[in-house]
Amino acid sequence: MADAAFSPSLTAGSRLKGVAAIWREADMIQRMAMVLALILVAAAILAPLVAPFSPEQQSLIARLRPPLGFDRYRDGYLLGTDELGRDVLSRTLYGLRLTLALAVIGASIGLVVGGFLGILAGLIGGIFEDIVMGAVDTQIAIPFTLIALLILSIFGSSMEVMVLVLGVHGWEQSARIVRGEVRKLTQMPFIEAARSAGASGPRIAFKHILPNVVSPLVVQFTLSLSNIVLLESTLSFLGLGVQPPTATLGAMVGIGRDYMPTAPWIVVAPALMILLITFAVQILGDWLRDRTDVRLRAR
Amino acid sequence: MLTYLARIVLKMLVTFFAIVTLVFFATRLSGSPIDFVIGEGITQEDRALLTSYYGLDQSTWVQYRAFLASFADGQFGLSFVERRPVAEIVGERIWPSLQLLLSSVALTLALSLPLGILGAVYCKSWVGSAVMVVAFLGYAVPNFVLATFMILVFSYWLNWLPVVGNGSAWHFIMPTITMSGILIAGLTRFTRNAMLDVLGQDYMRTARAKGLSEQTVIFKHGLRNASITILSVIGLQIAGLAAAGSVVVEAIFAWPGIGDLLVRSAIVRDYPVLQFGVIAVSVAVLLINAVVDIAYAYADPRIRLGRA
């Protein structure tokens, strides 16, 4: 049941039914999270079309203007402007776009690297497995924020380094999970059958093992998405993430903090946007995990 | 028990060595830190002098040995920025960090344990749902967002609480709440699940059947058995979360602790301080984990005797 949504062999019609079934099973909050996630993704993709201004366009005469409905509101700047006269709404939309893009890229890197190493560790075993699992244990032992501080301090803060940091985050969980699954799978009769039929190592890995670890990996992907959103916005907030003038939600909150007594809207819009993202991703991640966890479903 | 202890200590040593090595080689990857710290406008002679002063002209292997040796004299090298022994700089920061950590853990325990027990005992009613909502909010609200909103409301609008520093008891309120948010969420969830597992056990039915009061059943038979699992999560998750949380919380509230120091050193690339700070915090986390592992084994004979 849980695999219905991911299985490639389904026709378009039955897949639509699958979506409908998912919607029926979800409770009120989960449905809200799904709709919210769709809106956020759409807003992120369409940001260049929807945003009324360029996110970096400054206007000296329109600095620190409040949002619609307050005194001194300036026409067109719905959510007000920041200390350089940039449109808060446009920056929030572009920040959302960047945050989601970084999260998806970072989580994908962690997933691919971790999954690959996990499969290899599970299949090859021996000293290779020891090294991989040793690295996993070490990374689990150190709080990741510290590793991120180290990497960012050493390589400087740029988009590329940020992607690297976010990719390093979470690979260890994927590797751990996949290796566990592989260890279980290699005991299964069908792998033994494939092996005795003369299938090569890579063929077993990709044809027989990989499809069976996809589902736990998808769950892991969603969970690490929300962690990465948090990590990215936290680092940007501290001034260690993507550097100005690029609009990121965390940096908007971090820099806007200085203007909070007089211009709180600069902080409120991106902070609320971060909340919306983490809410949606967390609820969907929990929901996905509960759906795929047979033990929980049986309760 | 002895083999178990030896295994824990050995594992800790291996991880410690891996961390130290990782930190050392990571900081050598980016070329000379002198250029970052001093920047433009330094003469070639001065640059060479500084490079040899900090030993950066030696081979990597020699530097690595010197790095390990610097652990022995207890100074851990000199800060690039402050020109003082790193141990001194980090040392001044330990007590404020510890104070914040203790107050946060106290608040977390005071709220999470009752909430988690309530959530499990009343899991079918609105009380249980309310507990889960609280736990969820703690997870989903990033601590810097929570801190920002609190500062906005309680400092700027209502003018009740101070924003930066650690001068008085008032200064503790917002940092403690911010830091506890995610800890409370984690521990409440975990306490609830551990209690739910225990409440479904046969011996709970037996305890009720022999006519014990509900209070005795839940606290003496339930909580005591759940406490083993709860204890493990306090160490494993709380230590890591607290270390990560303190970085953010201390930076926001300019709390003069280790987390704040780490962020500052990362921004100005004061590698000796950053290196030692990362290692010190990691070791603290490792130690806490080891203590919990041992306490865990002490509380549960199944672990110390067999393989769990």
Image (spheres, coloured by chain):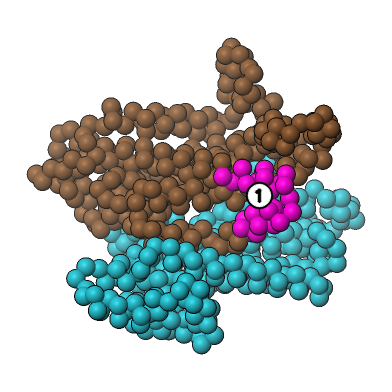
Chain colours: A brown, B cyan
Mark 1 closeness class: few <14, some 14–19, many ≥20 residues within 10 Å: many
Looking at the image, residue B306 sits to the left or right of residue A275; the answer is right
Please tell me whether residue A151 is drawn above or below residue A22 in the rendered image. below
Please tell me whether residue A292 is drawn above or below residue B24 in the rendered image. above
Q: Quadrant of residue A40?
A: top left
Query: Residue at the location (36% across, 53% down)?
Result: A241
Q: Nearer the viewer, residue B10 or A285?
A: B10
Which residue position holds label 1?
A176
Look at the image and say whether residue A119 sits in the magenta stretch: yes
Task: Report if residue B188 is visible in the image.
Answer: no
Q: Residue furthest bottom?
A: B73
Query: Residue at the location (30% across, 81% down)?
Result: B49
Which segment is the magenta one? A113-137
Give the percent coordinates (x, y) of residue A105: 46, 40
Chain of the residue displaying label 1: A
Looking at the image, residue B20 sits to the left or right of residue B14; the answer is left
Give the percent coordinates (x, y) of residue A4: 65, 24
Q: Residue furthest top?
A: A13
Residue type for callout 1: Arg
Q: Nearer the viewer, residue B81 or A257?
A: B81
Q: Quadrant of residue B112?
A: bottom right
Look at the image and say whether residue B177 sits in the magenta stretch: no
Task: Report if residue A254 is visible in the image.
Answer: yes
